[in-house]
Amino acid sequence: MNVLDAKIIPTVRGLEIYLDVEKSIKIKDIHILTMDSPFYEIQFGIEYFLLREKKYYDSEMNYFGIHMNHDFSLITLKEPEIESLFAVKNEDEQEATKKLLGEWFIKTNNYKESINEFAKKVKQENVYTDEDIQHKLKTLKFLEKLLELTTEDIELAPVEKLVHLEALPVF
């Protein structure tokens, strides 16, 4: 852990401190393109420390999603109904959070490791049908695209409320 790589967002609740430390990022849900639902989506949890006045700190885990269309050309950030990374923040704080995701989060070792670990588990899954093979290939392609995201991709993406993810089991 390099404290110099920590990122801080001042909010009305206190200072949110983000560190690229092991297990501070987790994949909560993933949704893969189907005939009924033509999009890809992944929901990440990010742990951070909230420094408040007259308190030491509290560790919190909040979530956001990355939503992509069928050909990965349109990216949207999704805000879940509860435990949202964007919740209880004013417009400036939400913009700072979005900037944090684009300039720091997608470049952290922990982000890359969480995606690579998930891909490794997908590769180890047994497949029995052509449908299983296609699902595995789509999942791996989506995970590969997540590793290729740029700062601009995130910063230009709109933030919308998450409707509902049809989740796949996370290993």
Image (cartoon, rainbow, N blue to C red):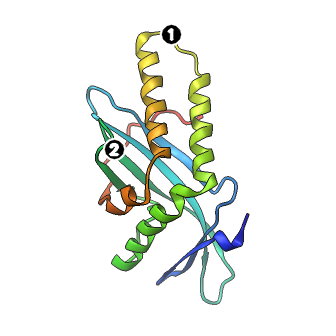
Residue where numbered disc 1 is placed: 128
| Left or right: where 39 falls relative to 22 | left
- Which residue appears at 48% of the width and 38% of the height? 144
Q: Nearer the viewer, residue 51 or 96?
A: 96
Label 2 sits on what residue type? Met
Quarter holding the C terminus is top right
Residue where numbered disc 2 is placed: 68
Q: Is residue 128 above or below residue 102?
A: above
- Which residue appears at 60% of the width and 67% of the height? 48
Instruction: Decide: few, some or many residues near mark 2? Use Cα within 10 Å; few <14, some 14-19, many ≥20.
Output: many
Q: Nearer the viewer, residue 32 or 108?
A: 108
Displayed quadrant of residue 153: bottom left
Q: Which mark is residue 66?
A: none
Residue 103 is situated, as x and y percent measured from the top left of the image, at 48, 65
Element class at badge 1: loop
Residue 64 is situated, as x and y percent measured from the top left of the image, at 44, 56
Label 1 sits on what residue type? Tyr
- Which residue appears at 64% of the width and 61% of the height? 20
Residue positioned most to the right:
1
- Which residue appears at 63% of the width and 57% of the height? 24
Quarter holding the N terminus is bottom right
Residue 162 visible to an observer of this rendering: no
Residue 136 is situated, as x and y percent measured from the top left of the image, at 48, 24
Instruction: Decide: few, some or many residues near mark 1? Use Cα within 10 Å; few <14, some 14-19, many ≥20.
Output: few
Displayed quadrant of residue 36: top left
Residue 77 is situated, as x and y percent measured from the top left of the image, at 36, 55
